[in-house]
């Protein structure tokens, strides 16, 4: 026991010595006043006053003041017990909530002041911006508002905190984003989601007692007798009272007395509604990227065959980290989402003049799309067909006159709406479902009619020239509906979700030339990408998987020549038109790949 008491006294004497060294920063009379009042009203202290005192700070439950600190970092944070150190903290600190909607907060360094080790106007601007993404240092117990604040203070080795996400349902507004920071900003404004900073292992946080305690005198207007010493003490240090003042002197010069019953208490942590869809946003730990060169791109970008840095995109509800696309949501109940998918098919080449029966066509289309779905996760609930027939002589006044058969060559196009219900899980995420839908929308469709192979290609209807929609009859039919459904319960599958299940690059319509066989030639690189290796967007841009571009880059390096390179073995490619650089890509595709479908008149009738 004697040894224990000796060790305790050594600790207390060391703390007292340090206290004496630092008290010189505060006027001696003010320091004495502070210690006298603190001893009278606040019970927490660091230095032993009797042999019965336990290890500091003591006691844990103070009736007037919040608990102060005795550790070596308290000088940095400005929350030391006054008998150890009187003064403000080393850093400009703010309180940040760890959990959205909860009141508990921690101290975070939020400023990049002039005079810091690596101060620059750019770092100061980025540090001071309203951009909170906490990072912690590896060597000291410091947490910064963002990486720029850490860099300003001379820290390069830091860890970016991940952020937990909980939502009532899948938040559609983030499906088009891949950057975790952009996703976070969107989620923070969502009423259906809450976010939580995940404290890394071995990182100690420091709890804020109050976000903005009152730190000035006579804010209440009720201070009757002015005292310069009381005001100086109010400004000198921080030991927050349970009534919400910076210290007991700030409370005295506002309320005139110190009450053991707080006029108001700090808010308690509340309960949040349980949200079943749970995920994690993960951020890069690397420091700010250097300037780009011809062979290097910032994080989140890819140096492609056109010698440019292009942003890497991910499928819906995935985030980019270290060049990989990772699922955001990994814990959720079995989700059953309902969508309707609109597909527009046009013939790829002149088809056979063979006559087909409408019933036969409906059966073939039904069987084809059922075969394209993953039966383990997705169920087709209904399929509706709109068939556009070119020749008007098939129809008289009544639509049923010549319904027995027609030539495949007379099909101008087909509109197909498919109602699906899909079940998501950790093993079958949304990205896999979106990938299958993308293939359904734009893949080549081969329909077999008793040995006859008929090819169609999926396109965006709005990209076709207006003349394509003239000169045909529209026939509508329900071709599959095993059970009656409520169509209002299904929502449209957004074009933002049309992506492949891979890290991918977006090329704008002015970045490529469309070829006659519907492949594309990337400008400035002589790189030719086959039709099955890219996905078009609603704006006539294209998405290409990073793996495809990597294979192309390796192949071009092996060949060592600047000649067009294909990603598949198909026929020789010739540019669709020498005027393609003057014509929008979507129109070029229609005019040259499907030019034989444009007629002059339109008629509509219904059939079942």
Image (cartoon, rainbow, N blue to C red):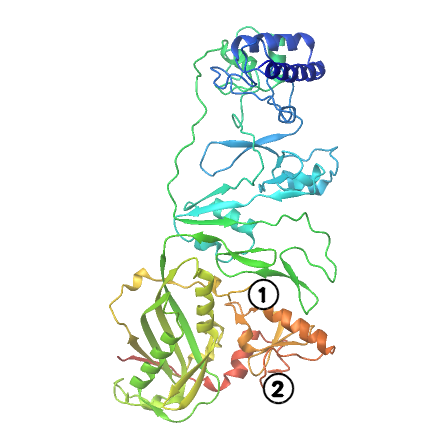
Q: Is residue 222 left or right of residue 48?
A: left
The numbered mark, 1 or 2, whose residue comes first in the sequence reads 1
> Residue 2, image x and y in percent?
60, 13
Q: Assign a secondary structure to mark 1.
A: strand
Circle 1 crowding by C-alpha within 10 Å: few under 14, some 14–19, many from 20: some
Q: Is residue 607 left or right of residue 50?
A: left
Q: Is the residue 205 above or below the residue 229 in the image?
A: below
User: Residue 17 lies in what quarter of the image?
Assistant: top right
Q: Nearer the viewer, residue 147 or 70?
A: 70
Q: Nearer the viewer, residue 15 or 112?
A: 15
Instruction: Specify the label residue 506 is tagged with.
Output: 1
Where is residue 570 shown, x and y percent of the image?
A: 58, 84
In the picture, the disc for residue 300 is none
Residue beneath label 2, please?
572
Residue beneath the point at 64% across and 27% down: 73
Point out residue 52 in the picture as x, y percentages from the top left corner.
Answer: 54, 10
State the residue in front, 219 or 19.
19
């Amino acid at each position: 026991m004697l040894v224990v008491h000796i060790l305790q006294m050594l600790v207390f004497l060391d703390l007292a010595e340090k206290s004496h060294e630092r008290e010189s920063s505060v006027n001696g009379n003010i320091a004495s006043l502070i210690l006298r009042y603190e001893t009278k009203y606040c019970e927490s202290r660091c230095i032993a006053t009797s042999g019965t005192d336990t290890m500091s700070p003591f006691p844990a439950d103070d009736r007037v003041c919040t608990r102060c600190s005795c550790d070596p970092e308290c000088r940095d944070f400005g929350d030391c017990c006054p008998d150890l150190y009187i003064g403000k903290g080393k850093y400009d600190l703010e309180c940040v909530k760890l959990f959205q909607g909860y009141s508990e907060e921690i101290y975070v360094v939020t400023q990049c002041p002039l005079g810091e080790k690596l101060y620059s106007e750019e770092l100061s601007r980025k540090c001071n911006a309203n951009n909170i993404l906490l990072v912690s240092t590896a060597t000291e117990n410091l947490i910064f508002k963002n990486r720029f604040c850490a860099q300003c203070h001379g820290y390069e080795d830091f860890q970016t905190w991940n952020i937990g996400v909980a939502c009532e349902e899948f938040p559609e507004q983030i499906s088009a984003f891949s950057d975790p920071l952009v996703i976070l900003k969107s989620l923070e404004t969502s009423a259906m989601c809450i976010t939580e900073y995940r404290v890394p292992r071995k990182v100690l946080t420091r709890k804020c007692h109050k976000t903005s305690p009152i730190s000035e005198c006579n804010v209440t207007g009720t201070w009757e007798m002015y005292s310069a010493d009381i005001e100086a003490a109010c400004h000198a240090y921080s030991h927050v009272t349970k009534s919400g003042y910076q210290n007991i002197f700030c409370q005295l010069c506002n309320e005139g007395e110190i009450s053991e019953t707080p006029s108001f208490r700090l808010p308690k942590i509340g309960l949040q509604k349980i949200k079943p869809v749970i995920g994690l946003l993960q951020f890069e730990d690397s420091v700010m990227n250097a300037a780009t060169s011809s062979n290097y791109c910032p994080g989140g970008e890819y140096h492609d065959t056109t010698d440019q840095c292009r942003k890497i995109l991910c499928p819906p509800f995935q985030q980019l980290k270290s060049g990989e696309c990772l699922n955001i949501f990994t814990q959720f109940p079995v989700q059953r989402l309902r969508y309707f998918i609109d597909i527009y098919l046009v013939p790829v080449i002149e088809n056979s003049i063979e006559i087909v029966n409408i019933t036969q066509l409906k059966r073939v289309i039904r069987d084809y799309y059922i075969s394209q779905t993953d039966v383990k996760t997705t169920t087709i609930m209904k399929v509706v067909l709109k068939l556009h027939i070119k020749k008007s002589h098939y129809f008289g006044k009544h639509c049923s006159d010549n319904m027995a058969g027609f030539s495949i060559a007379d099909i101008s196009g087909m509109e197909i709406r498919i109602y699906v219900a899909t079940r998501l899980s950790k093993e079958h995420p949304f990205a896999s479902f979106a990938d299958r839908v993308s293939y359904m929308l734009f893949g080549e469709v081969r329909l077999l009619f008793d040995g006859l192979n008929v090819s169609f290609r999926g396109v965006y209807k709005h990209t076709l020239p207006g003349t394509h929609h003239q000169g045909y009859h529209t026939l509508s039919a329900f071709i599959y509906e095993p059970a009656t459904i409520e169509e209002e319960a299904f929502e449209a599958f957004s074009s933002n979700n049309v992506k492949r299940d891979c890290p991918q690059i977006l090329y704008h319509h002015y970045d490529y030339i469309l070829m006659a066989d519907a492949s594309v030639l990337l400008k400035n690189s002589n790189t030719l990408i086959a039709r099955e290796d890219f996905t078009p967007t609603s704006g006539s841009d294209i998405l290409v998987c990073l793996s495809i571009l990597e294979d192309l880059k390796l192949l071009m390096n092996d060949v060592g020549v600047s000649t067009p390179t294909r990603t598949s073995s198909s026929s020789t490619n010739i540019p669709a038109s020498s005027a393609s650089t003057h014509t929008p890509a979507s129109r070029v595709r229609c005019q040259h790949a499907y030019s034989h479908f444009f007629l002059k008149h339109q008629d509509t009738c219904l059939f079942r």
